[in-house]
């Protein structure tokens, strides 16, 4: 395959100027959206109408499957948060608090972590023993609600998540002006940041033929130690389980901008199938971001339900399916994007018929490097994968 190179990277100074101009324009638009949200609340109050917010509904019932695009998309349903409704008053207040924090961050040209935003808004309401937020699990969904309500990405709100995932392989990137050769990243690899947009990460030089994405860091370590990426001319990534947005966005950019196939090595269980579904079609809770996260061309290479017999695995690798696993597997089989695919129906039902699930690590029972030296190379050569 021909070598891939992108346009020559600009100097750090030029790139910084371009980024500043683009960021300033983006920040101005985001600030305007927040002010408009506040103005609408104030307008209703001065008109003696109950202050309220309209928030797009992030649920399965408001998620549509776009068969032509091969992605999930958010519908048009919204829910109303009213100040004087006891059921929604707290969420109304929380939404306004986070909107204020975001406005301050943009105004100060600073960023904050999800955790930082949670603590910035967390306090005890005067005259009560009630906290504005009790846990970060309360806070994060409110921030996602603001994303869809404002029509702005998390990066545009100056919020980042904890880095999770790693990358190594035949590619050189530029991260905020610093050149990173992913061929020389040692045993730990390049830590994937949560913000990987083109104004932060640029692709400078890439010789890789494809990206192999594995589910967990433990499996990634085996591939990296065996230098699989060097022997098979690829890029190797992991997302520490279900990949965070930064990892998924980077995979999508590698696929769309460099035309690299994305091939996944995940566990043979409902969770592994779900992770693949999220990578390929997008997730229900983040359907509003599918156009910048989903990779409809992604392939599922393994591990597969047939592998217990096909690979001659030991009895000890079997993990009994729980009632929750069985229900989840049936739910996944009924997803519209899997329902019409005979090979996926066969895969899920064979796992159910087996009555057990398997992790990628189970291949170690054959040999410590069986997965890197035999299993994956043979599957790649035979193009034996599911899509």
Image (cartoon, rainbow, N blue to C red):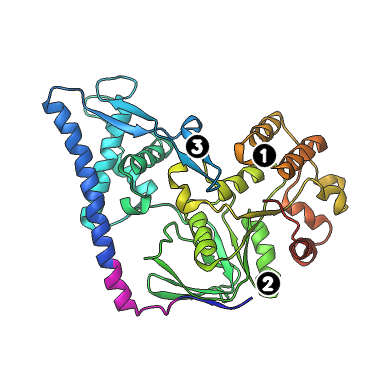
**Mark 2, secondary structure of its residue:** loop
> What residue is disc 1 on?
340
- Report how far apart the C-alphas of labels 3 and 1 lie in the structure: 16 Å
Whether residue 12 appears in magenta in the rendering, the answer is yes
Between marks 3 and 2, how big is the CA–CA gap?
41 Å
User: Mark 2 or 1, which is nearer the eye?
Assistant: 1
Residue bearing the label numbered 2: 227
As drawn, 202 above or below 51: below
Point out the residue furthest to the left here.
Answer: 46
Residue 373 shown left or right of residue 222 in the figure: right
* Residue at mark 2 to residue at mark 1: CA–CA distance: 38 Å
* Residue neighbourhood size for the residue with mark 1, other residues' Cα within 10 Å, grouped as few (<14), some (14–19), many (≥20): few
Cβ–Cβ below 8 Å for labels 2 and 1? no
The residue located at (50%, 37%) in the rendering is 64
Q: Which residues are magenta?
A: 7-19
Q: Point out the frontmost of discs 3 and 2.
A: 3
Q: Residues within 10 Å of mark 2 (few under 14, many from 20)?
A: some
**Residue 64 got which mark?**
3
**Nearer-N-terminus badge (3/1):** 3
Q: Residue furthest front?
A: 68
């Amino acid at each position: 395959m021909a070598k891939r190179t992108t346009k020559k990277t600009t100097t750090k100074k030029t790139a910084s100027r371009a980024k500043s101009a683009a960021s300033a324009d983006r920040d101005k638009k985001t600030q305007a959206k927040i002010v408009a949200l506040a103005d609408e609340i104030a307008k209703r109050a001065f008109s003696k109408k109950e202050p309220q917010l309209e928030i797009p509904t992030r649920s399965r019932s408001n998620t549509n499957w776009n068969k032509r695009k091969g992605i999930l998309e958010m519908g048009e349903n919204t829910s109303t948060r009213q100040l004087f409704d006891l059921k929604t008053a707290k969420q109304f207040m929380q939404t306004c608090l986070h909107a204020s924090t975001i406005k301050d961050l943009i105004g100060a040209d600073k960023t904050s972590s999800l955790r930082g935003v949670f603590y910035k808004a967390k306090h005890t309401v005067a005259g009560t023993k009630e906290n504005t937020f009790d846990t970060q699990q309360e806070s994060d969904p409110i921030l996602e609600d603001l994303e869809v309500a404002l029509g702005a990405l998390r990066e545009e709100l100056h919020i980042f998540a904890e880095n999770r995932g790693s990358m190594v392989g035949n590619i050189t990137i530029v991260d905020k002006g610093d050149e990173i050769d992913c061929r020389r990243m040692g045993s730990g690899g390049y830590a994937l940041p949560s913000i990987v947009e083109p104004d932060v990460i640029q692709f400078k030089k890439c010789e890789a033929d494809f990206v192999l994405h594995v589910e967990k860091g433990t499996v990634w370590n085996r591939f990296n130690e065996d230098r699989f990426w060097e022997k098979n001319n690829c890029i190797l990534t992991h997302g520490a389980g279900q990949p965070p947005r930064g990892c998924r966005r980077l995979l999508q950019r590698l696929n769309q901008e460099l035309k690299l196939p994305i091939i996944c090595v995940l566990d043979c269980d409902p969770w592994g199938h779900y992770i693949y579904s999220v990578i390929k079609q997008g997730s229900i809770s983040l359907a509003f971001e599918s156009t910048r996260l989903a990779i409809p061309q992604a392939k599922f290479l393994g591990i597969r339900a047939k592998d217990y017999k096909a690979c001659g695995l030991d009895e000890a690798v079997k993990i009994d399916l729980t009632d929750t696993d069985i229900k989840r597997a049936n739910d996944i089989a009924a997803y519209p994007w899997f329902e019409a695919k005979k090979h996926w129906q066969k895969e899920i039902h064979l796992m159910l018929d087996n009555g057990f699930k398997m992790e990628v690590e189970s291949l170690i029972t054959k040999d410590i490097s069986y997965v890197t030296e035999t299993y994956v190379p043979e599957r790649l050569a035979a193009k034996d994968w599911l899509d």
